[in-house]
Amino acid sequence: MHPAYSVILFTTASGAGYGLLCLMGLGAATGALPPDRLLGLLGLGLALALITTGLLSSTFHLGHPERAWRALSQWRSSWLSREGVLSVATYPPAAVLGIGWAVLGRTDGLAALAGLAVSVLAPVTVYVTGMIYQSLPTIRQWHQPLTAPVYVALALATGALLLSLLMAVVGHDVHGASSLAAVLLGAAAASKLSYWRSVDAALPLASPETATGLGRFGKVRQLEAPHSQANFVMREMGYFIARRHAQALRRIVLVLLFAAPLLLCLFAANAGGSTAFAALLSGTISAAIGVVTERWLFFAEAEHVVVTFYGRQSA
Amino acid sequence: MTTLPTSTAKKLGLVIDLDICVGCQACATSCKEWNAQGYSAPLVDQDPYGADPHGPWLNRVHTYEVGEGETARTVHFPRSCLHCETPACVTVCPTGASYKRAEDGIVLVNPDTCIGCKLCSWACPYGAREYDYLEGVMKKCTLCVDRIYNVNLVEEDRVPACVRACPTGARAFGDLSDPDSAVSKNVAARGGYALMPELGYKPANKYLPPRDKRGGASRPVTGAAAPPASTGSSLENLFAWIDKALSGQGLN
């Protein structure tokens, strides 16, 4: 599948934003995070900025962005529509939490209730984003039970990393947040490794023989394509990265997105002051490059079944 | 509404005979011509006379070589929307622009409400939907909904443009839910099949497989293929020498 940069930016930026929002909400509701106005302003501000940037960037790839509001209507059948509805529904409780925390300096009462609401709505929104891909029976690399859970795991891990960094910026003890980030990064790594294992074990959906139904007559080879230049289907669905390159990129993801930030979080959890801040900043930058690579690879490794009509041996 | 109708009164669709399709592209070009001025209009190509022409076509004809050696055959394979009974392209649509008609089963896109998110094209296993970069909306086969019910056309023209244009009669149009329709009878008689039924989309369109080759599938090569014995004339020997010399065998 062609990796569209607007969709990569949307899913990674808003994923981290929703992860941060979820943990801020949970921290407010449980009292685990201090009702510090600066932390509330920076944390919720960054979360909502990332979410909003992501949502806006996702409309860039639309043919008619001005009609985007129509996407809220078909939640009964469409995961994309459900994503739209949930992303809009997350804003009001996030605003209540923001006013309570950043303006009034309170995370109890109504703000705690709003925190609880966003801590549920945010990961559910990310899960629904993952389901857009997981629900497609045409792409075996996406039609996997772990596709949507990996989206949630990565959102929470990158969000926890951002929370740790903000705690260091504001000058709070980062031990708890960094430890949580390390645990969530480990869980995300485990889920992604398990996802890759199931993808590698999944049998191809089709071959030129099964796609055309002509396999009973023998091997099917494309003699002549229907068009001399790539059409929309080949431009959109024909992109596929060679296995050798995919393996190299997977290793880069393992190091930049998981191993390096995890170790830096563990280091920061037991350090303090500017050392912890430097470690968490490097970890965040590393994870940012890693998660964009992971998302690019998520598209580049995905094979759409239609390519078998164009002679590719399997998909 | 992108939720699917529980049943449709008719299942209009195409039956394509792979035995007699000659791959002339008349269906593809007449489709483009009709739809560039009808329901799907405009259906414009980009850079049409340049180095990289592309644009939405609603019907594409592949040519395959099938089988090995002397039993190999060439099969021309037109590919367009199959107007599936349970098309995921419709249910994934977030706006309701994609829909399946309850009255005849035709799958359509409303170009006035499509936001151009392209998700429907990802959900289609058959590559039937092509995005129009100029219009910013998805285009697909309409089964010529603006021809088949059009009382302003003479009766024989009230079929999809591709069916009307096919010079070999390889394409037929009809109601595949009616077991007594000509298309259903032909599907039953010829073992017509749906594409990739394992994916569960339940295509309405069916393909009729190529018939066994005349004289059996494994016709032995007869003596006609062997070259005639040499007459030994001097002219023939001269040509044999030239042939050998030119093919590089006589020079060593």
Image: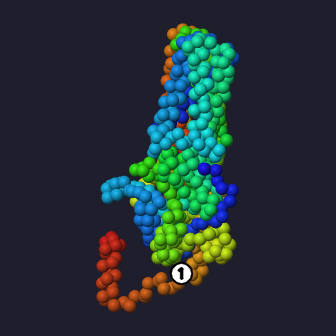
**Viewer-proximal residue among A235 and A315:** A235
Q: Residue B44 is drawn in which quadrant?
A: bottom left
Disc 1 marks which residue? B221
Q: Locate residue A225 relative to residue B191 in the image: left or right.
A: left
In this rendering, would B84 be left or right of B30?
right
- Tell me which corner region of the image, top left, top right, bottom left or bottom right, holds residue B46: bottom left
Residue A31 drawn above or below residue B234: above
Q: Where is residue A197 in the image (x, y as percent from the top left)?
A: 64, 40
Callout 1 amino acid: Val
> Where does the C terminus of chain B fall, quadrant-wise?
bottom left
Crowd rating for badge 1 (residues with CA inside 10 Å; few <14, some 14–19, many 20+): few
Q: Pinpoint residue B244: horizontal percent, then vertical percent.
A: 34, 76
Residue A135 x/y as whole percent: 63, 45
Is disc 1 placed on a helix, strand or loop? loop
Say if A217 sits above or below A84 in the image: below
Q: Which residue is drawn at 57% across and 17% down?
A: A99
Residue drawn at (59%, 77%), measured in percent from left and top? B212
